[in-house]
Image: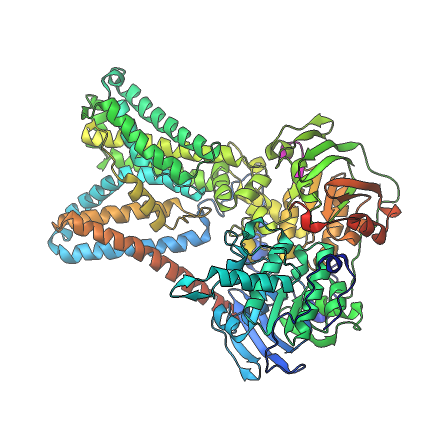
């Protein structure tokens, strides 16, 4: 069994499994190929999502899937999970051709999937979720006691024995929900566990715990397909890497630790780039104070936060999930009511409510694109003009032609792909959806842009473009307040950085005066994510 | 920006997306960016979203089938063009009152709500506008009262739902009970006869051979279509129903808009109350019984998504007309109302099934064609 790394999570979790995490499937030979895909093709209306995918996964390895948004990773997962059936190509599972006609069949065969948007039933208990669909029962009655016992057993082996099996999933923080998803996979005696960006919802120390769990699983001969946008994670946990681009495998079975970053990126994008941050303006070109926040407080979320943003300045907030940063942003935006403190725009105190904030010139790209920002079934142009359609209207009548023209202009500026503004937003990839959300606030009148995790789930190429866009906006005099979990992003993009921990600003400095390690230390110092308010 | 791609494979932008055909795209952009404020002649008539039109074709198919059934069962009647014209008018007249209510209902459902109290509001507005006291102000006073009562009751619904955070189902269910109670109390459970010839003439008269009630339905449907597809109110309705959180964070006042949607539904009920009172030349607390179910069913048949965010006025109108045609079909064949209700239930299920099937298969077919022609 792999030794646990010395990270805080492991140190604090006394229930480190001595017993094997799960009983290893008896007939699993380590290193044997459990899954082999050959030339798998899957088409959707208007899109060839998978166009000849090759993949080979061995027992006991962590196989990483890399690819930009829209490369076909999600579709591939859904084919493996039995959600979609491939149009052509072979799926070989444990040496035999297999077709999974539905998710139950895949699960029965031993493939468990942990989706990015966790598919838990929020109003059922932890145990009920873990055993959803295959509850212990006799004579039609669910055997709750046995289920709870088994769940507790699995949870403690996952290092989270403190989660009560009877607790409602709704009340758990994101990391806890992921643990429940993992418990569900283990309750199925899975031979292959697919994890779709598992670290995206996790705080830094929780990622260490996740890796520990993954190592224990693979030591038992279970194969893991790991999907992430973060190269450093792949280096740390992965064994082999398969790269997808435009639905095709562009490289298979690269060694995860030794393959140069440049190679991986160029195979993902077809070009060689790294995180490129636009240059900061040479002189201090920022103007007068635009936003002034004083003593803003919401109990349990953040306390006594004061900050300011000047016109043309990018201010970054670094902090963990749960440090109160998203809540702070929403409160400034008027979407939450502060208990104390003031928010001023241009020196004038804002009236409560989003409407007043928007009228004062604020715009926000919220953390959850799909649930908080987009009308997925509506055309792109209507999403771009969602906040501004009233301005193009005359006497209450909308002006669709003008809106299309404006949206098209935005699409051109942001290099939206595809450019057709009449397509439903649903058909766009994550990065392009984010461009639509940001683009909404470029339609004039926005003086302060609040960006909450603007590049979450956005691929490398689109990221660089977004950074350019944000800097260009600042150059035009827009103030930007940016929240991100990725410290390099905050340091690279912002002019001034605030570090938040447990709802308080612990450090404020020019971005040039800070480096990644300093910020990480500040962010992590004494942090106890387990008890932090969600 | 940074899309200078050195590798040839990445140069064509998403070759697997042939749906985005080059000849269409620039042309449309050119027209769209042509001149702002021209109203966009390209698309003024194109409303309800592209999918809605496809869905409505299915409804027209159902309607055609019903007419065929009528023609087969009563060939002698359908052979007489004069009778057919009068029968069409009869069907439209039958559909008019529920149709007006359904337009309001469609807005509420697209906005993510439901209004169970429409029948009760019609009854209350009808009773209130036919009290002796109101009638003393003449036809104008009666019409004003009916509309005002409708709007006010709708506003009460809206305030309870938006600001009192009641679930729409509960709030309007309570209003359903309460408004009928109030109507019964005002009318003292008596039928109140309308003595205004102006009001009574609305249902009795025709203009250019078409009943005035049908004109009213047409006007309300037209107004509803314009409001939904061409105004900021309509856009907000779709946004609020489709993703309330996104609408809120985009600066739309979701609560106020939700409240206004119920007021709009109430206004439609007020109009319907005048029409119904005119038809009966009287009003009573039991009038417009179960209109809420007819209106909801018609909207659903018309393709309005019960979870909000999607729906069409034309679809709802077709839904109402299909119901009226069935009623008419049974009446001319002398069949019982019981059999009629059973068939209506079946039609609701069948229409929705047909739409889903047809919609899916059409899109799949299109997609397949696109992909195969491209590769």
Residue A283 lies in quadrant: top right
A254 on left or right of B203: right
The residue nearer to you, when weighing B43 against B273, is B273
The residue nearer to you, when weighing A270 against A525, is A525
Residue A475 lies in quadrant: top right
Q: Quadrant for the C terminus of chain B, please.
A: bottom right
Image location of residue A311, percent across then percent down: 77, 36
Residue B272 in magenta stretch: no
- Does residue A307 sit above or below A224 in this rendering? above
Q: Quadrant for the N terminus of chain B, please.
A: bottom right
Q: Is residue A295 visible?
A: yes
**Colouring style:** rainbow
Residue B281 lies in quadrant: top left
A29 on left or right of A145: right
Image location of residue B6, percent across then percent down: 76, 67
- Residue at (63, 48) in percent of width and height: A437
Image location of residue B84, percent across then percent down: 18, 48
The residue nearer to you, when weighing B241 against A323, is A323
- Does residue B274 sit above or below B59 in this rendering? above
Q: Is residue A460 visible?
A: no
Image location of residue A88, percent across then percent down: 53, 77
Q: How many marks?
A: 0
- Does residue A214 sit above or below B95 in this rendering? below
The span shown in magenta is A358-363
- Residue at (68, 36) in percent of width and height: A332
B283 on left or right of B152: left
- Residue at (41, 60) in percent of width and height: B359
């Amino acid at each position: 069994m792999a030794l646990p790394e010395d990270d805080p999570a492991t140190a604090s979790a006394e229930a480190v499994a001595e017993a094997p995490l799960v009983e290893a499937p008896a007939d699993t030979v380590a290193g044997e190929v459990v899954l082999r895909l050959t030339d798998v093709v899957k088409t959707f209306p208007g899109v060839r999502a998978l166009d000849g995918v090759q993949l080979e996964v061995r027992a006991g390895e962590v196989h990483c899937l890399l690819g930009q948004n829209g490369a076909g990773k999600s579709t591939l997962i859904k084919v493996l999970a039995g959600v979609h059936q491939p149009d052509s190509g072979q799926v070989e599972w444990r040496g035999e051709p297999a077709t999974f006609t539905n998710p139950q069949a895949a699960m029965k065969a031993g493939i468990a999937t942990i989706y990015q948007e966790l598919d838990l039933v929020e109003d059922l208990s932890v145990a009920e979720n873990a055993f959803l669909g295959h509850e212990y029962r006799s004579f039609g009655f669910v055997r709750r006691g046995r289920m709870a016992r088994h769940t507790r057993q699995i949870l403690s082996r996952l290092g989270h024995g403190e989660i009560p099996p009877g607790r409602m999933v709704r009340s758990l923080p994101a990391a806890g929900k992921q643990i429940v998803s993992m418990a569900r996979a283990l309750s199925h005696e899975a031979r292959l566990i697919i994890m779709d960006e598992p670290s995206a919802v996790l705080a830094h120390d929780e990622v260490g715990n996740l890796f520990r769990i993954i190592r224990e699983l693979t030591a038992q001969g279970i194969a893991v397909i790991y999907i992430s946008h973060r190269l450093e994670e792949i280096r740390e946990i992965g064994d082999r890497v398969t790269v997808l681009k435009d639905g095709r495998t562009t490289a298979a079975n690269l060694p995860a630790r030794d393959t140069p970053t440049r190679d991986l990126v160029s195979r993902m994008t077809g070009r060689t780039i790294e995180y490129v941050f636009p240059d900061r303006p040479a002189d201090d070109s920022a103007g007068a104070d635009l936003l002034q926040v004083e003593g803003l407080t919401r109990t349990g979320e953040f306390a006594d936060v004061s900050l300011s943003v000047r016109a043309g300045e990018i201010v970054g907030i670094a902090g963990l999930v749960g440090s109160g940063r998203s809540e702070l942003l929403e409160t400034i935006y008027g979407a939450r009511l502060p208990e104390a403190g003031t928010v001023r725009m241009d020196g004038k105190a804002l009236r409560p409510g989003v409407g007043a904030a928007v009228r004062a010139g604020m715009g926000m790209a919220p953390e959850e694109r799909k649930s908080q920002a987009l009308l997925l079934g509506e055309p792109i142009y209507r999403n771009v003009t969602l906040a501004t359609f009233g301005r193009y209207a005359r006497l209450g009548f909308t002006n669709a032609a003008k809106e299309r023209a404006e949206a098209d202009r935005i699409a051109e500026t942001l290099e939206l792909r595809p450019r057709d503004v009449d397509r439903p937003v649903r058909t766009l990839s994550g990065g392009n959806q984010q461009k639509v959300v940001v683009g909404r606030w470029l339609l004039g009148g926005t003086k302060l842009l609040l960006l909450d995790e603007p590049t979450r789930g956005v691929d490398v190429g689109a990221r660089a473009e977004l950074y350019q866009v944000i800097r260009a906006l600042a150059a035009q005099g827009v103030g930007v307040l940016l929240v991100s979990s990725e410290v390099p992003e905050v340091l690279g993009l912002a002019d001034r950085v605030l570090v938040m921990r447990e709802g308080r600003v612990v450090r404020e400095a020019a971005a040039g005066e800070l480096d990644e390690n300093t910020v990480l230390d500040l962010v992590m110092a004494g942090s106890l994510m387990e008890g932090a308010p969600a | 920006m940074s899309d200078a791609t050195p590798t040839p494979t990445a140069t064509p932008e998403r070759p697997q997306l042939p749906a985005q055909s080059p000849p269409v795209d620039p042309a449309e952009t050119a027209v769209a960016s042509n001149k702002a404020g021209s109203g966009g002649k390209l698309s003024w008539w194109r409303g309800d979203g592209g999918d809605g039109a496809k869905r409505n074709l299915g409804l027209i198919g159902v309607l055609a089938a019903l007419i065929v059934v009528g023609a087969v069962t009563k060939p002698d009647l359908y052979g007489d063009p004069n009778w057919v014209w009068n029968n069409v008018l009869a069907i439209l007249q039958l559909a008019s009152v529920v149709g007006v209510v359904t337009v309001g209902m469609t807005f509420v459902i697209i906005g993510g709500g439901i209004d169970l109290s429409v029948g009760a509001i019609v009854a209350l507005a009808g009773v209130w506008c036919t009290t002796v006291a109101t009638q003393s102000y003449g036809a104008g006073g009666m019409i004003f009262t009916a509309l005002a009562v409708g709007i006010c009751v709708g506003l009460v619904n809206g305030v309870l739902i938006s600001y009192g955070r009641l679930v729409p189902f509960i709030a309007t269910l309570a209003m359903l009970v309460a408004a009928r109670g109030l109507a019964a109390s005002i009318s003292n459970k008596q039928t109140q006869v309308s003595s205004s010839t102006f009001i009574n003439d609305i249902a009795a008269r025709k203009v250019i051979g078409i009943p005035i009630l049908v004109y009213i339905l047409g006007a309300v449907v037209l107004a509803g279509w314009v409001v939904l597809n061409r105004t900021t109110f309509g856009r907000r309705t779709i946004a609020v129903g489709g993703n309330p959180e996104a609408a809120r964070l985009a600066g739309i006042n979701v609560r106020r808009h939700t409240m206004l949607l119920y007021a709009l539904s109430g206004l439609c009920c007020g109009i319907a109350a005048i029409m119904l009172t005119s038809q009966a030349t009287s009003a009573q607390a039991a009038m417009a019984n179960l209109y809420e179910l007819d209106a909801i069913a018609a909207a659903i048949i018309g393709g309005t998504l019960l979870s909000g965010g999607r729906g069409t006025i034309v679809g709802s109108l077709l839904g109402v007309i299909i119901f009226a045609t069935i009623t008419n079909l049974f009446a001319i064949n002398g069949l019982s109302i019981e059999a009629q209700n059973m068939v209506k239930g079946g039609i609701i299920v069948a229409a929705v099934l047909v739409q889903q099937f047809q919609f899916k298969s059409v899109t799949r077919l299109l997609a397949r064609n696109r992909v195969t022609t491209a590769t």
